[in-house]
Amino acid sequence: MKLLSYLHDGREGWGVVVGDAVAPLAARTGHPTLADFIASADYARRDVVVAGLAGELPLATLQFLPVIPRPEKIVCAVRNYMDHHQEVLAAGMQRELSEQPPIFLRVWRSQVAHGAPIVRPRVSDSLDWEGELAVVIGPGGRDIPEAKAWDHVAGYSIYNDGSVREWQFHAKQIASGKNFESTGGFGPWMVTADEIAPGRALKLETRLNGEVVQSSHTGHMIFPIPRLIAYASTIFTLVPGDVIVTGTPAGVGWSRKPPRFMKPGDVCEVEIEGIGVLRNPIVQQA
């Protein structure tokens, strides 16, 4: 099942994808947002909730929103693929493997939806791509053990963790380069967890103007999804609709010789097996 958030006739909504259309569910379920639905008892019976529904709104007529437009937390993993860690070292950055998952937080205003432009800020020309698997939290919790972590996954989506590189390197804490407004693509929808077996290795490919720049699979993560959930939930309570962005494989632009970055007029796509394609054009900040 694919669930998404959208804008139609100036109003926010959410629904289930049926073919090339969407069946709206906010009014039907009484849950105003997708995050509210995930938090409700209705989510466990979602098959019954959507049974027999027809698509009413063609996808082509909708403006996509980030899957969870305003999550309480966006928790992002750093250097969570060994090949990416190695390319970081090869590029001259001294970073040791951590015994614990290194993470940072994104703010929701840094997100853009599928089809919406990723904005290169006027203060930088080093806007880089990072194709990543996103995990949407279902049942919340604190101190979640790894053995129970899969029970807390509502579904999966795609993230382009757009990075403003020189701002990322202003200090050891990289969050400044990861939170520029409208730099992180998130979408197009969430595929519910029952559609993807826990731990399944999913092919991940990032393309810039049709050229493959990243090609890997999620089985190469250093810290797998249960470890990330357990670690994050030790720090703070995870709530329904929180997003965990699981890290990127090798192939980012700044490690190339010479470095290569996204520029206005480019189109960046991230495709993940079993989920779909997240597509964003690149524009310059006005």
Image (tube, grey):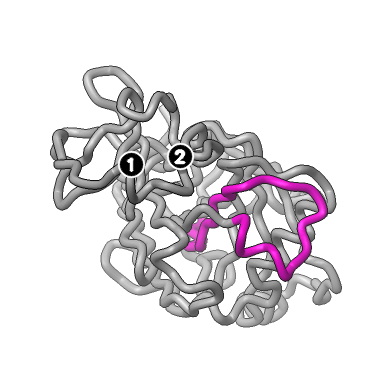
| Residue drawn at point x = 50 percent, y = 41 percent | 38
| Residue drawn at point x = 51 percent, y = 32 percent | 36
In the image, which residues are magenta?
A: 128-152
Return the x and y of residue 151 as percentages of the image width and height: 61, 60
Q: Is 132 contained in the magenta span?
A: yes
Q: Is residue 122 visible?
A: no
Labels in figure, total = 2
Q: Tell me which amino acid carries mark 2.
A: Asp
User: Which callout, 1 or 2, points at the residue further toward the start of the chain?
Assistant: 2
Return the x and y of residue 284 as percentages of the image width and height: 40, 37
The answer to whether mark 1 and mark 2 are in CB contact below 8 A is: yes
Question: Which of the labelled discs sits on residue 49, or is there none?
Answer: 1
Between 143 and 170, the one nearer to me in the picture: 143
What crowding class fits label 2: few (fewer than 14 Cα within 10 Å), some (14-19), or many (20 or more)?
some
Q: Is 210 contained in the magenta span?
A: no
Q: Is residue 13 visible?
A: yes
Tell me the element at label 1: helix
Would you identify the image quadrant in which residue 89 lies? bottom right
| Residue drawn at point x = 55 percent, y = 43 percent | 124
Q: Tell me which amino acid carries mark 1.
A: Val
Question: Which of the labelled discs sits on residue 78, or is there none?
Answer: none
Quadrant the C terminus occupies: top left
What residue is disc 2 on? 42
Between 97 and 47, the one nearer to me in the picture: 47
Return the x and y of residue 166 as percentages of the image width and height: 65, 51
| Residue drawn at point x = 47 percent, y = 64 percent | 260
Q: Is residue 150 left or right of residue 162?
A: right
Return the x and y of residue 175 as percentages of the image width and height: 71, 46
Tell me the element at label 2: helix
> Looking at this rendering, what residue extends furthest in the top direction?
10
The vertical placement of 127 against 202, above or below, is above
The Cα atoms of the two marked residues, 1 and 2, are separated by 7 Å
